[in-house]
Amino acid sequence: MEIKVGVKQVSRELVVESDQTAAEVEKAVASALDKESVLVLTDTHGRKVLVPAASIGYVDIGEESARRVGFGSTLP
């Protein structure tokens, strides 16, 4: 799933491809904002992205299902 984080006073957004579910990401964002701490997201390669909660402008949580691309993909 693709997660986009808008950072205050920065023109580009952070884009993280993650295996976390939408519910897990939403819970992590809410927890970071409530505690005024750090949002921690883990990408598909196991790397962690840390964003100070005070700097978060918005979080866009993409679809959970992966899109099939290419000639070899089959429809269910």
Image: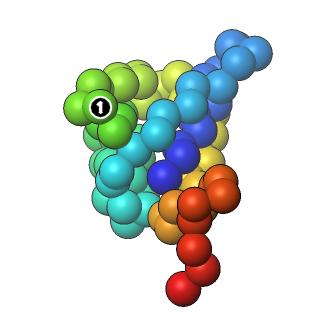
At x 41%, y 24%, the residue is 51
Tell which residue pokes out farthest to the front in this image: 72
Nearest the viewer among 38 and 11 is 11
Q: Position of residue 47 (x, y in %)?
A: 27, 25
Is residue 42 visible in the rendered image? The answer is yes
Check disc 1: other Cα within 10 Å, few if <14, some if 14-19, many if 20+: few
Figure check: 46 above or below 74: above
- Left or right of 56 in this view: 19: left
The residue indicated by pointer 1 is: 45
Image quadrant assignment for residue 27: bottom left
Is residue 36 visible in the rendered image? The answer is no
Image quadrant assignment for residue 18: top left
- Left or right of 16 in this view: 48: left
Q: Position of residue 30 (x, y in %)?
A: 39, 52
Q: Position of residue 28 (x, y in %)?
A: 33, 49
At x 52%, y 61%, the residue is 66
- Left or right of 35 in this view: 53: right
Nearest the viewer among 13 and 56 is 13
At x 59%, y 38%, the residue is 4
Tell which residue pokes out farthest to the bottom in this image: 76
Q: Amino acid at mark 1?
A: His
Secondary structure of the residue carrying numbered label 1: loop
Figure check: 68 above or below 60: below
